[in-house]
């Protein structure tokens, strides 16, 4: 697959950068999504129990044991395998990867030939606009406060609260719930007036660590599509209610472009 240019209305294919060229952030993003075992290649996520059984798209028999993923009867030199979360095994063209959510193990099957990958032509974005880098103020959460994060499949988990960012977007006062690491980077999940119209139904937004006085710049040009924009088999977190904005945020990635 060739690397596309991400522009407002089309994604035109261009040559991949030469070895002498430093890949751009857009090149690296496209590579991560479109690689043979990249984001768009996820074909199945199978939640496992203790009973070994066959699962669609995966060779052998699979079950969960102690939070890990166990495969037996696999083709090749290693017929049996135990995978901890994050570990993977390549079998032919497939990549079989273990995940764990709240103690529940699952097997993910990445297949380069899945239609979600082969139909992908690029990532469409809104035009970059410096006006969408908005100044705000970070308010840390009270000690011991927690938030409930709901995923697209209805699963809920409770996490320690990090805080909120108050800012004004196109005349509308909003307060974004954020999570992450105050020593590294924060992130918000947002929906807005473009969601399900000109953009995917929600997006992820990385945010730089606030200054000591709480001041922070939220650059909506950095908004990017969640994994579930490329495959229905991810379990992405949904935006909290106060992160569902009425205003149109015409910045950042907006939708996957497919043939």
Image: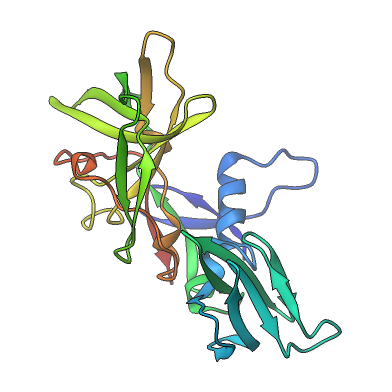
The extreme right residue here reads 77
The answer to whether residue 100 is above or below residue 17 is below
Q: Quadrant of residue 204?
A: top left
Front residue of 239 and 203: 239
> Residue 258 location, x and y as percent?
42, 68
Relative to 229, is 28 above or below? Answer: above
Residue 149 located left or right of residue 186: left
- Residue 112 in the image, given as x and y percentages of width and height: 61, 74
Residue nearest the observer in this picture, 186 or 106: 106
Figure disc tally: 0
Q: Quadrant of the C terminus?
A: bottom left
Of 41 and 179, which appears nearest the observer?
179
User: In the rendered view, would you say 96 is above or below 148?
Assistant: below
Is the N terminus in the top left, top right, bottom left or bottom right quadrant? bottom right
Q: Nearer the viewer, residue 154 or 228?
A: 154
Q: Which residue shows up at 82% across the image and 81% down it?
A: 78
The image quarter in which residue 229 lies: bottom left
Q: Is residue 96 left or right of residue 164?
A: right
**72 on left or right of 257:** right
The colour style of the image is rainbow
Q: Residue at x 30, y 41 (%)?
A: 147
User: x, y percentage for residue 218?
Assistant: 36, 26
- In percent of width and height, residue 186 lies at 44, 32
Residue drawn at x 22%, y 58% as measured from the top left: 196
Q: Is residue 23 left or right of residue 198?
A: right
């Amino acid at each position: 697959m060739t690397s596309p240019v991400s522009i407002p209305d089309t994604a035109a294919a261009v040559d991949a950068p030469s070895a002498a060229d430093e890949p751009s952030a857009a090149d690296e993003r496209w590579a991560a999504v479109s690689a043979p075992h990249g984001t768009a290649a996820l074909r199945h996520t199978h939640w496992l129990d203790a009973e070994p059984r066959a699962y669609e798209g995966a060779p052998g028999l699979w079950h969960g044991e102690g939070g890990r993923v166990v495969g037996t009867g696999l083709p090749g030199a290693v017929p049996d395998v135990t995978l901890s979360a994050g570990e993977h095994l390549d079998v032919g063209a497939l990549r079989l990867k273990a995940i764990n959510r709240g103690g529940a193990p699952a097997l993910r099957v990445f297949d380069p030939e899945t239609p979600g990958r082969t139909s992908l032509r690029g990532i469409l974005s809104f035009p970059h606009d410096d006006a969408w880098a908005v100044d705000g103020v970070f308010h840390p959460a009270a000690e011991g406060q927690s938030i409930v994060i709901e995923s697209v499949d209805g699963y809920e988990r409770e996490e320690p609260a990090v805080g909120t960012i108050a800012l004004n977007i196109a005349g509308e006062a909003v307060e974004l719930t954020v999570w992450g690491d105050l020593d590294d980077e924060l992130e918000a999940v947002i929906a807005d007036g473009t969601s399900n119209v000109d953009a995917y139904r929600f997006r992820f937004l990385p945010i730089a660590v606030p200054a000591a006085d709480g001041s922070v710049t939220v650059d909506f040009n950095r908004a990017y599509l969640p994994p579930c924009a490329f495959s229905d088999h991810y379990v992405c977190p949904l935006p909290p209610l106060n992160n569902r904005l009425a205003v149109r945020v015409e910045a950042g990635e907006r939708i996957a472009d497919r043939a």
